[in-house]
Amino acid sequence: MRWIVDARNNGQRQCFSYDGLDLLRGFTGDAICAGYDDGTGSWVYDENYSYNNAGNLISKTGQGTYGYGVAQASTCPEGALVKKHAVVSTSNGSSYCYDQNGKHAAAHDRGNTYTDV
């Protein structure tokens, strides 16, 4: 998908770009959306992603860089599983925990804790 238009929200537009492996590299909204020149709408943003050679997301606009499977954060419950290909932290201070089955169990983000039940 290269772009979408939301007819219910005044024609809000989103455009997407991909790399040679079809991994999402970025998306933009309205005024900076390539292929449109009228710049209508209020959703102006520019999100970008980068990946390592294994295809793991390593950075995202607003989230910083991602850490994988080295060690669980100290905020994770005892017995949390370290997963080699799962995000365990971001450079903005978020952390993610997984149970022994590999299921996402908890997230800690900007002072808030979220747990899965």
Image: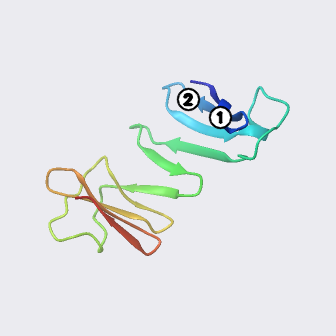
Give the residue at mark 1: 8
Q: Secondary structure at mark 2?
A: loop
Q: What's the mark number on residue 107?
A: none
Q: Position of residue 87 (x, y in %)?
A: 36, 53
Question: Above or below — where is 20 with respect to 9?
Answer: above
Residue 19's image quarter?
Answer: top right
Amino acid residing under circle 2 = Asp
Q: CA distance from mark 1 to mark 2?
A: 30 Å
Q: What's the mark number on residue 19?
A: 2
Residue lying farthest front?
A: 8
Q: Position of residue 3 (x, y in %)?
A: 64, 27
Q: Comparing marks 1 and 2, which lies closer to the viewer?
A: 1
| Crowding at mark 1 (Cα within 10 Å: few <14, some 14-19, many 20+) | few
Question: Above or below — where is 54 with respect to 77?
Answer: above
Q: Secondary structure at mark 1?
A: helix
Q: Position of residue 35 (x, y in %)?
A: 77, 25
Tell me the residue at 61%/31% (across/down).
17
Amino acid residing under circle 1 = Arg
Q: Position of residue 76 (x, y in %)?
A: 26, 69
Left or right of 3 on screen, residue 71 = left
Tell me the residue at 53%/43% (across/down).
50
